[in-house]
Amino acid sequence: MKFTKLEHSGCIIENNSKKLVCDPVEFEAKIPKLSNVEVIIITHKHGDHFQPQILEKIVMKNPNVRIFAPQDFEISEINGQKIEKVEAVTGCNTANFSLKFFGRNHMPIIPNKIPCANIGVTINDKIVNPGDSFDLPNDLQNPELLLVPSEAPWLKSFESMEYIRNVQPKLVVPVHNAVLSKTGDNINNNWLKMACDENGVNFAALGIGESIEI
């Protein structure tokens, strides 16, 4: 499989020339015109993970795509394509992707207040994307790749570092980093890499559009 980082928490995963897209958004970087998209996953409804106009463009080019989102997602369809609302007990197989959803809530920004629902997903038992949470994937140890949130109003660096220690992946890619300057990104990456080095985990700070084989 091929993993490509998009802006912020967005990514593309390719398997057998088909694509799975998570949380595609545009702030400064444009998303490429995507074809052969089999699956879209929106981890939660916040604007830094879900932009309707971007989703519409992808669906127009891929009318048979399946779209998954949490239970509290207000929109039921995009361009006539139904949005399938899932929760932690949901699993789904498409032609090229095996999906296992986990977690329930977005991490609190204000203490004791849950902002919205959030779904994490394990893809083909290899790649773990927790969305905006540090929830642990169900029944999976030492995944090939773990996406780790790097910076947000709801996290501290030691929480991201502890998440790496708890999941023990083979490789970490930092995400949720559009809120950082280049200098801030480097600082946070140094902390995450320290946690990786301490636990024998590889670390890849991918730029927008950069890829790695899994």
Image (spheres, rainbow, N blue to C red):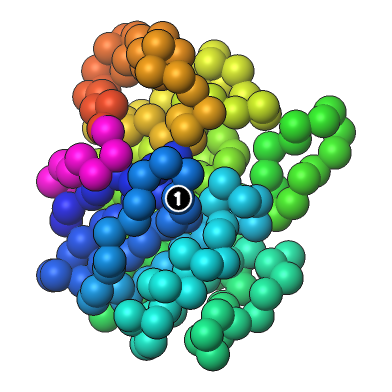
At 73% from the left and 65% from the top, the residue drawn is 72
73 left or right of 25 in image: right
Write the start and end of the magenta stretch as one range: 207-214
Instruction: Give the residue at x 80% y 43%.
Output: 114
User: On the rendered structure, is 106 left or right of 95?
Assistant: right
Q: How many circles with numbers are drawn on the protein?
A: 1
In this view of the protein, can residue 91 be seen by the observer?
A: no
Above or below 114: residue 93: below
Q: Secondary structure at mark 1?
A: loop
Residue 20 point in image, percent of width and height:
32, 65
| Magenta-colored stretch includes residue 209 | yes
Q: Residue at x 20, y 40 (%)?
A: 210
Q: Position of residue 201 (x, y in %)?
A: 26, 23
According to the picture, the residue beneath numbered tag 1 turns out to be 26
Is residue 99 something one can see in this rendering?
Answer: yes
Of residues 152 and 129, the one nearer the viewer is 152
Quadrant showing the N terminus: bottom left
User: Is residue 199 toward the left or the right of residue 69 in the image?
Assistant: left
**Residue under the point 62% across and 51% down:** 47
The type of residue carrying mark 1 is: Glu
